[in-house]
């Protein structure tokens, strides 16, 4: 009934579920007022429909009205946001499988006070080769997201080593060649000549 493919879609998630007639089944999700098909529907409206959280919420109410159900029984926009945040947290915490054909895309965000966020996105070469179109965000998997107070080549090298232990060694590392990323990549390559 519910299919999740965490490697190939928006935020790494594809959810296939009938929408019309599928809202408000009898089974409620534990800890929620809503059933799984309602949750899936509003997440799909937001991610695949590229509409606002308020819009996703209201569409759910419209579908309920059309289906003869209570048109006021739908998640608020803040509840939609919570659903999406929970999916994102799952994607960040899940164990990525070990592969030997990762392409990493690494960067630091702008400084926010004393902190930066170090992000590594990845796509397997086998997936990239089969795309037949330009790379899109939904093709990427978030492999690492860390807040850091300082960064230099040695720190980046250590972060890459820890990531490689979880996901396998990459075949390529792409970055904007900032000094810390450039040096960290060089140090990592010295120990991993295949990269």
Image (cartoon, rainbow, N blue to C red):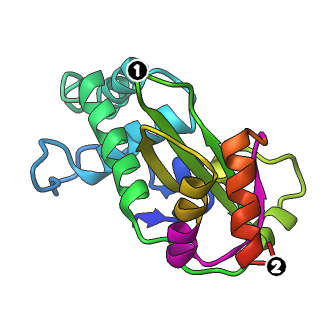
- Mark 1 residue element: loop
Residue 108 against residue 59 in the figure, above or below: below
Residue 110 vs residue 149: left or right? Answer: right
Q: Is residue 62 visible?
A: yes
Whether residue 46 is in magenta: the answer is no
For the point 59% across and 52% down, which residue is it? 120
Residue 162 vs residue 70: left or right? Answer: right
Whether residue 170 is in magenta: the answer is yes
Position of residue 123 measured from the top left corner of the image (x, y, whole percent): 70, 61
Mark on residue 121? none
Position of residue 14 measured from the top left corner of the image (x, y, whole percent): 53, 55
Residue 190 vs residue 53: left or right? Answer: right
Q: Earlier in the sequence, mark 1 or mark 2?
A: 1
Task: Count neighbours of disc 1 (C-alpha within 10 A) and say few if under 14, some if 14 to 19, many if 20 or more.
Answer: few
Identify the magenta region: 161-176
Q: Residue furthest right?
A: 132
User: Residue 53: which quarter of the image?
Assistant: top left
- Mark 2 residue element: loop
Q: Nearer the viewer, residue 154 or 121?
A: 154
Locate the C terminus and report the quarter of the image it occupies: bottom right
Q: Nearer the viewer, residue 142 or 126?
A: 142
Task: Count neighbours of disc 2 (C-alpha within 10 A) and say few if under 14, some if 14 to 19, many if 20 or more.
Answer: few
For the point 54% across and 43% down, which residue is it? 151
Per the image, the residue denoted by label 2 is: 194
Residue 41 vs residue 120: left or right? Answer: left
Per the image, the residue denoted by label 1 is: 113
């Amino acid at each position: 009934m519910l299919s999740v493919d965490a490697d190939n879609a928006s935020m790494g998630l594809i959810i296939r579920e009938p929408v019309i007639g599928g809202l408000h089944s009898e089974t409620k999700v534990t800890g929620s007022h809503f059933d799984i098909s309602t949750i899936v529907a509003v997440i799909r409206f937001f991610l695949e429909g590229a509409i606002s959280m308020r819009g996703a919420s209201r569409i759910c109410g419209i579908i309920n009205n059309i289906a003869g159900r209570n048109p006021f029984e739908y998640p608020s926009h803040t509840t939609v946001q919570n659903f999406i945040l929970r999916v994102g947290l799952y994607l960040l915490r899940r164990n990525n499988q070990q592969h030997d054909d990762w392409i990493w895309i690494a960067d630091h965000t702008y400084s926010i006070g004393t902190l930066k966020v170090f992000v590594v996105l990845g796509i397997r070469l086998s997936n990239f080769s089969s795309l037949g179109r330009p790379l899109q965000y939904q093709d990427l998997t978030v492999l690492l997201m860390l807040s850091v107070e300082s960064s230099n080549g040695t720190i980046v090298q250590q972060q890459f080593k820890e990531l490689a232990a979880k996901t396998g060694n990459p075949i390529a590392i792409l970055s904007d060649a900032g000094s810390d990323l450039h040096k960290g990549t060089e140090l990592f390559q010295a120990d991993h000549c295949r990269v």
